[in-house]
Every structure is written in structure tokens, then in C-alpha cells.
Image (tube, rainbow, N blue to C red):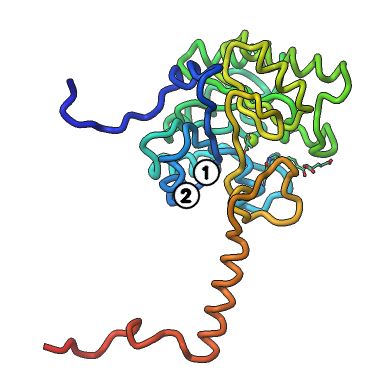
Amino acid sequence: MSVSAAIRRITIPQLRARKGQEPIVALTAYTTPVARLLDPHVDVLLVGDSVGMVVHGLDSTVGVTVEMMALHTAAVRRGSVRAAIVTDLPFGSYQASPRDAFAAAHRLMVEGASAVKLEGGAEMAETVAFLTARGIPVMGHVGLLPQSVNMLGGYNARGRSPEEAERILAAAKAMVEAGAFSLVIEGTVEPLARRITEEVAVPTIGIGASVDCDGQVLVVDDLLGLTGAGTPRFVRRYADLAGAITEAASAFAADVKARRFPGPEHVFAEKKPS
Ligand SMILES: Nc1nc(=O)c2c([nH]1)NC[C@@H]1CN(c3ccc(C(=O)N[C@@H](CCC(=O)O)C(=O)O)cc3)CN21
Ligand SMILES: CC(C)C(=O)C(=O)O
Ligand SMILES: [Mg+2]
């Protein structure tokens, strides 16, 4: 028996075994302090390429680089002891070849990722098989694929036509067949997400998908009320940090202008009393 009761990080096989069990709780995280706060409450910290939009002010995730994902993965790793860390492979790092995908994924694993996530369907199956055969666990991402926004023209829900629903189901099955340990289902009509969840042997994690998925994920800034207009409809807001920040900044500004800050307790006397 081990001497210490050290907290062990959740493993990929443990996540895989959650199919049909207690729902998997996942949130995105991009920084050490937020990862530290979320870690006790979640099974997965997802270092999402949404970081480009949420933190760096990009219009889409298309401009996110491996370098950015590496820095945020390292930051999240430093703030967490328990959750599995899954990092998005960014656009351009995996589509051209399995070898590109391996190099990018390896870099992210070196920085502390437990697994990588990639968007796509049957066309990515070869890459998923290449990575998983070589020691890199892969989470698939099907449905609404934000990295393909330039092909799709927007972020509207997918799987409305029977043809598109069949294509997305086939994408999910191809990823799992190729070795994906879990699937994110994003922005699909609800019955499709339920059907995928029923028909694949690995846990599905929904975002704008279905309550019947094997877990749920949200972008943490959305849940905290930090993203304003344009926040997706599938978000439930659990806090109003935008309001809290606005109040704090305006109170600080008023105190500075009125010379109420700093107070006597915030400044250094010339000599300490003896
Ligand atoms: N803050 C944030 N939250 C996310 O969930 C998220 C990102 N950013 N960035 C990366 C992707 C992009 N995603 C998005 C972005 C926008 C919508 C959205 O606005 N959907 C509209 C419908 C849009 C339409 O019909 O064209 C909605 O009402 O939900 C959905 C998913 C999900 N991901
Ligand atoms: C929303 C999740 C699934 C994601 O891919 C991201 O945050 O980039
Ligand atoms: Mg993503």
C-alpha cells in the first residue's frame, strides 16, 4: 500500500470506462489560476482552441497556433493535479498528414496534455489510428466544427437534414473505429446527439448537443458570464463575472479620482515603530 494518499490524475482508460456511468464533467481552462479553481470539480480540463477567440480576441479559431496551445497547456498543467488535460490540436497542425499531427500532438503532450482532441470525420480516421497506435490518446470532435467555419459560413447547428445527420453519425463511428477514446459532439440537433451516444461504445461529451450525452462541456468564460453578446445559445450562465469586473473597475476609478485609494494601510511608513 502506498504511504501517501496522493491524488492521482484521472486516466484516459478511466474516462473511457465512464460510458453509460456517471456523466463526465468537463470545462475549458486556459490559465493556471482558473485551472486551480476548476480542478477539484471537473474530470477533464479542456485546453480548447476557443482560447483564440475568448482570450486572444481572434474572430475564429482558425488563427490559433501550436505555440499558443503549448503555452496554455503548460499553464493549465501547472494549476491542476486531478483532472485529465485534453488539448485541442489547432487548425493546420493535423489536417495535412498523420506525421504533422503526431509532431503537433507530441509537442502538446510534452507540455502536459494527457490527450489531444481533433475535429473531423471519416477523413481524419487514418490520423486518429496513426496517433493512437503510437501512444497518443485522441478525443474526436464531430458535429459543428469551428475550425471549418470558412467552409460552413457560420456556427449554426448541424444535422438538420437526414443526409447531414448520417454523415455526422458516420464521422463519429469512423473516429471511434480508428481508436478515439471519447467524442465531443458540438452543435447538433438533439436526436442526432442521442443517437450517436447510443451507437458508439465510447463516452460522448456534449456542447449544444443533448442531456443524454455521457458528459457535458462548456467554455469556462461563457459559464462565468465573461463573454457578452454572441455567446452561444447552448450556454447556461452560472455567474456574472463581467458585472463583477465592471463594478470593481468603476469603484477603483472613483476611489483613485477622489484620493480614497491608497489608504494608510496600503502605503509604507518611513520607519517601523519599535
Ligand atoms: N465563447 C465561446 N464559446 C464557445 O462555445 C465557442 C467559442 N467561444 N469559440 C469556439 C467555438 C465556436 N463556437 C460557437 C460560436 C458561436 C455560436 C453561435 O453563435 N451560435 C448561434 C447560432 C449562430 C447561427 O445561427 O449562425 C446560437 O444562437 O447559439 C455557436 C458555437 C463554440 N465554441
Ligand atoms: C468547446 C470545446 C469543445 C472546444 O473545442 C473548445 O473550447 O475549443
Ligand atoms: Mg475547440
Type of the residue with mark 1: Ala
Tell me the distance, in whole angstroms, between the alpha carbons under discs 1 and 2: 6 Å
Q: Quadrant of residue 153?
A: top right
Quarter of the image with the N terminus is top left
Tell me which residue sits at (51%, 85%) in the image. Answer: 256
Tell me which residue sits at (61%, 27%) in the image. Answer: 205
Which residue is the site of mark 2?
34
Q: Using residue 9 as the reference point, say whether residue 186 is left or right of it.
A: right
Type of the residue with mark 2: Val
Secondary-structure class at tag 1: loop
Q: Earlier in the sequence, mark 1 or mark 2?
A: 1
Tell me which residue sits at (87%, 16%) in the image. Answer: 163
Residue 205, placed above or below residue 197 = below
- The quadrant of the picture showing ligand 1 is top right
Q: Position of residue 221 (x, y in %)?
A: 60, 50
Residue 263, placed above or below residue 23 = below
Q: Position of residue 112 (x, y in %)?
A: 42, 34
Asked whether the residues under the numbered discs 1 and 2 touch, taking CB atoms below 8 Å apart as contact, a structural biologist would say yes
How many residues crowd mark 1 within 10 Å: few (<14), some (14–19), many (20+)? many
Near-viewer residue (175 or 57): 175
Residue 232, placed above or below residue 89 = below
Tell me which residue sits at (54%, 17%) in the image. Answer: 19
Q: Does the residue tagged 1 have its C-beta within 8 Å of any atom of ligand 2?
A: no
All told, the count of numbered labels is 2
Residue furthest to the top: 177
Q: Position of residue 228 (x, y in %)?
A: 70, 56
Q: Quadrant of residue 232?
A: top right
